[in-house]
Image: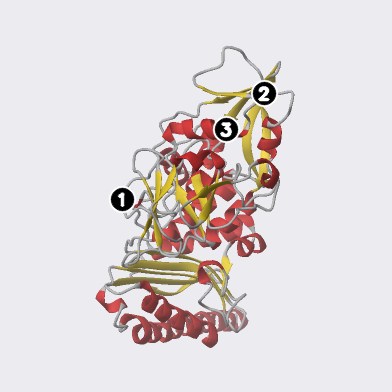
Amino acid sequence: MQNRRLFFFLLLNFFFLLSLNSCSVSKQINKRANNILLKDTAISTGYIGISIYEPATNKYWYNYNATKYFIPASNTKLFTLYAGMKYLGDSLVGARYFHIGSALFVKPTGDPTFFHPDFEFQPLYELINNPNEHYIYINGVSNAIKKYGKGWAHDDYNKSYMVERNKFPIFGNVVWLSDKPIYPKNLLRDTLMDTQRIASNYSYWIKPAYFGKDFSSTANTLNQVSVTRDIIINRFRIDDDYSNGEKIGLQTIPFNTQFGSTAIEILQDIFKEKEIKNIGGVYGFKVKDTILHSQPSDSLFKPMMHRSDNFFAEQTLLMASNEHLGYMNDEKIIDTILKLDLKDIPQKPKWVDGSGLSRYNLFTPQSFVYILNKTKNEFGWNRVKNILATGGTGTLTNYYKKDSGFIYAKTGTLSNNCAISGYLITKKGKMLIFSVLTNNYITGATPVRRAVEKFLKEIREKY
């Protein structure tokens, strides 16, 4: 009896001391958050939410406004990443197809890697380029997918970060413009040479060559220019812009996908000897599809997270919908994931797009801690840390350089809003999952990011 009482006494003392230690850690972090973040001259003009969690003990170390909702910007991509890892498997489905005689029927899957210069392996190109295929029919290119997401700033249509989304992307749905020849590192070098345009005292190159006819220039040099596309049609203009212009270097300008017809026209321009058509509706015959895999999934997810590629994120969500639901609908796949896969999320988010471009998105810091923990548990730490940027890389290129390899995170930025959520390995080897969301400050993002960096570095050093 005495041994039992002693055991319970020691057990109670253990939990009491554990509770004291937990309270102590929370108080210490609160002091640091107050001094570094809450009193910061930039952050204090707006709002901030913070959540720090230790998965090994299933304990929150610190919460401040952690259940409040914030605009997360590109932190939204952490939820899109989960959807892609959950439903796209190890390899992307680049297309589904079948043959009838010398005709090839292709069903697009939303794969953004087709003819994208970042990807050397192009199996759909090889399939279409087969000399035995004389007629190429692309099924269902015209569709009801809205080219922009809810809440996107439509006057940004000309910006490289707001590329149109659709069922059948090609060349990343952008025109590649350069002041020198564009030579991709892959088979596109020989088959899709850029076209050269000559101006008064300089020349420039365009890829795909199809758009060469659609460019004009009034610029005297290519050192300080703006490149503008008409909002309705694919007509591009290069003008001198001495106040806001930039050197062309290598730029990408979104083209108008015209409900998929632009992709068909580009393909016809490339494969001049073939007949390429868009067909809609249901086929009048039953033939089993063959699945064509294009790229390892992580080869898409990594640049999506490292450079915060909005286009890759939007297409990832559409592909996940196509594979899981059988059709592409971002609203339906988001609703399905929230109801089934993420039904136990602590605060249900308002999640409206794949990229985070929309200011309609609303998430809490704890919801990002939740999705990061779930992603790690379901897909493994080694895979996750290979996808996310660490200090000195990707969107963290100018941050956490000393702690490279100890932080793996996703940033997010919209005007007057920035965020960072991820994993932090402390000096004592503890893994923490954190989320810091800041909204409505009136400065630029840099002072806010530096304050958050200082705060997270101190957490790493102390614990």
Task: Say which amino acid is labelled 1.
Answer: Asp
| Quarter of the rendering occupied by the N terminus | bottom right
Viewer-nearest of discs 3 and 1: 3
Task: Say which amino acid is labelled 3.
Answer: Asp
- Disc 1 crowd rating (10 Å Cα; few below 14, some 14-19, many 20+) is few
Circle 2 residue: 98
Give the quarter of the image for residue 94: top right
Q: Write the residue at 32% across / 61% down.
A: 69
Circle 1 residue: 155
| Quarter of the rendering occupied by the C terminus | bottom right
Q: Along the horizontal axis of the image, is 415 left or right of 281?
A: left
Task: Say which amino acid is labelled 2.
Answer: Phe
- Disc 2 crowd rating (10 Å Cα; few below 14, some 14-19, many 20+) is some
Q: Which of marks 2 and 3 is nearer the N terminus?
A: 2
Residue 348 against residue 243 in the figure, above or below: above
Circle 3 residue: 269
Q: Position of residue 459 (x, y in %)?
A: 49, 82
Q: Where is residue 14 in the image (x, y as percent from the top left)?
A: 54, 82
Q: Where is residue 129 in the image (x, y as percent from the top left)?
A: 70, 32
The color scheme shown is: secondary structure
Viewer-nearest of discs 1 and 2: 1
